[in-house]
Image (cartoon, helix red, strand yellow):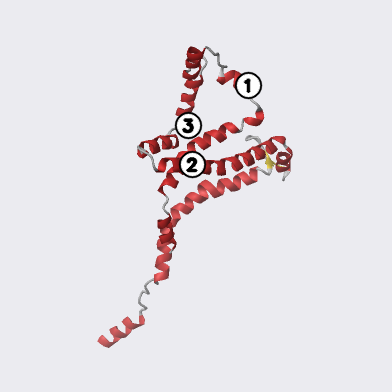
Amino acid sequence: MVATTIDRARTVPAGRPWSRTTTDNLWALLFVGPQLIGLLAFSAIPLLSALYLSLTNWDGFGNQTFVGLSNFVEQIQSPDLHIALWNTLVYTLIAVPGGLILALLVAMALSNIQFKTFYRLLYFMPVVTSSVAVSVIWLYLLNNDFGIINTNVKAWTGIELPNWLVRFASRFDPKLRPLVPLLDSTRRATGAKAQRLLGWRPRDHWRSAR
């Protein structure tokens, strides 16, 4: 009787444990799965939907009409696209090297001066300051009725400055208008780039490379 029981126990296959590779793959899928779901739901699916809608004629309501590449041909022939590409090219060619050179000069100026921490804080403040707050400050500075710039210049010199927010903007050369976001982005990025250059140490990079 005992021998029969032992023989039956031997014939029952024992559960095989998962291999190390299978276990690692399951744990990796467990951790990566939520990120993949978010990537599909908020990036891949909207991107494919936008690609499909770009091939149709649809105003957001009603039926969709497939038009192929006619929308892309219309955009390529549009003069607005040429202006946007030109402005982007000018912005890139000026902002990237110009901002880096300006940040390098600021970093060199702040490297060996007194109250270095205070000046570094001043240069870094535009990076963390909201664009809305900066816009409101400039509106108050350039206001024609009670702005600090116009009122002080008129009080000290008697010169009547123009209304910067209305007259000058309406007469501003359209070719120079892209300089406005260029100057604003340079103002915001100079402090951050200068901070990185001030914290850069060639010895640390050399040791990391080795």
Label 1 Cα neighbours within 10 Å, binned few <14 / some 14-19 / many ≥20? few
- Residue type, mark 3 in image: Ser
Return the disc, 1 or 2, that comes first in the chain's sequence: 2
Secondary structure beneath label 2:
helix
Q: Give the camera-side residue of 40 and 130.
A: 130
Return the disc, 3 or 2, that comes first in the chain's sequence: 2
Is 30 drawn above or below residue 172 in the view shown? Answer: below
Q: Give the camera-side residue of 7 and 197.
A: 197
Residue drawn 52% across the image and 33% down it: 184
Quarter of the rendering occupied by the N terminus:
bottom left
What is the distance, in whole Å, between disc 1 and disc 3 at their CAs?
23 Å
Closer mark to the observer between disc 1 and disc 2: 2
Q: Provide residue 203's location: percent of width, then percent of height.
A: 41, 57
Q: Give the camera-side residue of 151 and 14.
A: 151
Residue 131, disc: 3
Closer mark to the observer between disc 1 and disc 3: 1
Indicate left or right for 163 with 74 as reference: left
Indicate left or right for 89 with 201 as reference: right
- Residue type, mark 2 in image: Leu
Mark 1 touches mark 3? (CB < 8 Å):
no
- Residue type, mark 1 in image: Ser
Secondary structure beneath label 1:
helix
Residue drawn 39% across the image and 38% down it: 120
Q: Provide residue 114's location: percent of width, then percent of height.
A: 35, 38
Residue 105, disc: 2
Secondary structure beneath label 3:
helix
Is 195 drawn above or below residue 35 in the view shown? Answer: above
Residue 170, disc: 1
